[in-house]
Image: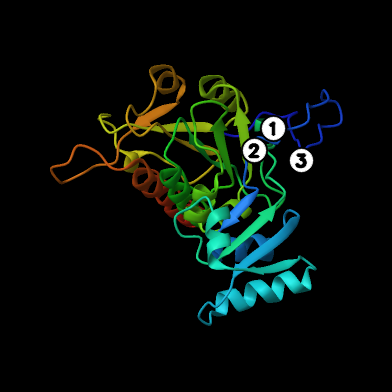
Amino acid sequence: MTPPRGRDRQRDGRSSQNGPPRRAPLPELGGDQVEGRQSVLELLSVGRRTVRKVMIAQDQDASPLLDKIEELASRMRVPVETVPFLRLDSIARTESPQGVIAQARPLEPVALEDLCVPTRKGVQPFLLVAAGITDPRNLGALLRSAECAGVTGVVLPRHRSARLSPTVTKTAAGAIEHLTFAVVGGIPAALSTMTELGVWSVGLAGESTKSLYDLPLGEGPVALVVGSEDKGLAPLVRRRCDAVVSIPQHGALPSLNVGVAGAVAAFEVARQRTKAPFSSN
């Protein structure tokens, strides 16, 4: 589960000293319109990308979050525009923007290889592969759980997948500001590349007879692979996973929501990683 030598690339987009030049990432993720108080606050707090403007609806009740947003925007010299509720709602792309919208530079993806090496702090890759999640609320909820569990990178397919729309960013509650994304042409090919780089991929499938809880997930690079809402893992994606497991259930329903299943699995990895440093004692 240790990445092969000779692929020690940094995550700033540069190739290793002897490696081939890398194509520039495409600005295809989205994330340019951020709605919701927590999401806008994280956008400003993290300072990862340029914020062009913040719009706040007039005549709102006092809110510590709004106060903090205005304070941060002022400190960062981001223009703050106070607008009528009706205008804000006409600009919003979610049902309830909570009285605040920010416009920012879109998030830029990185190369898949950059996700498959330890972070600058030495943390082993812990990846989430969203193999065809099309519901933006499911993707947003999954990203929020993933960030809280310590996921270091997210892999999205270029086609048949939700992007970082305002609904995704709002549901994720600011998680996208802390996550790094790669966009790939196909998940099966990406999984093969990840295997070559030493990342162990674990697919979630409700019908599998193998339990998630029987896998050793606490050490080394690992990727959780979750499929689409209706069909789960595609056959070729499933074959490319190093292991396919299920989450044991004890009720009458046949399966978990994809966002919930991904969250349970991510926190199982986090639990094992927390115990791993003490396992040899």
Nearest the viewer among 210 and 149 is 149
* Spatial CA span between label 2 and label 1: 7 Å
Q: Is residue 38 visible?
A: yes
x and y percent of residue 9 in the render?
Answer: 76, 36
Mark 3 vs 1: CB contact within 8 A: no
Mark 2 vs 3: CB contact within 8 A: no
With respect to residue 241, does 143 lie above or below?
A: below
x and y percent of residue 44 in the render?
Answer: 68, 64
* Closer mark to the observer between disc 2 and disc 1: 1
Please, what is the three-letter code of the amino acid marked with disc 2?
Leu
Mark 2 vs 1: CB contact within 8 A: yes
Q: Residues within 10 Å of mark 1 (few under 14, many from 20)?
A: many
Please, what is the three-letter code of the amino acid marked with disc 3?
Gln
Q: Earlier in the sequence, mark 3 or mark 1?
A: 3
Nearest the viewer among 85 and 228 is 85
Q: Which residue is mark 1?
A: 111
Residue extending farthest to the right is: 17
Nearest the viewer among 98 and 244 is 98
Instruction: Give the side of residue 83 with respect to residue 13, left or right.
Output: left
Instruction: Give the side of residue 212 with respect to residue 117, left or right.
Output: left
In the picture, which quadrant includes the N terminus? top right
Q: Tag on residue 115?
A: 2
Q: Earlier in the sequence, mark 2 or mark 3?
A: 3
Q: Residues within 10 Å of mark 2 (few under 14, many from 20)?
A: many
Q: Is residue 281 visible?
A: no
* Spatial CA span between label 2 and label 3: 9 Å
Instruction: Give the side of residue 250 with respect to residue 123, left or right.
Output: left
Q: Tag on residue 10?
A: 3
* Spatial CA span between label 3 and label 1: 11 Å
Please, what is the three-letter code of the amino acid marked with disc 1?
Ala
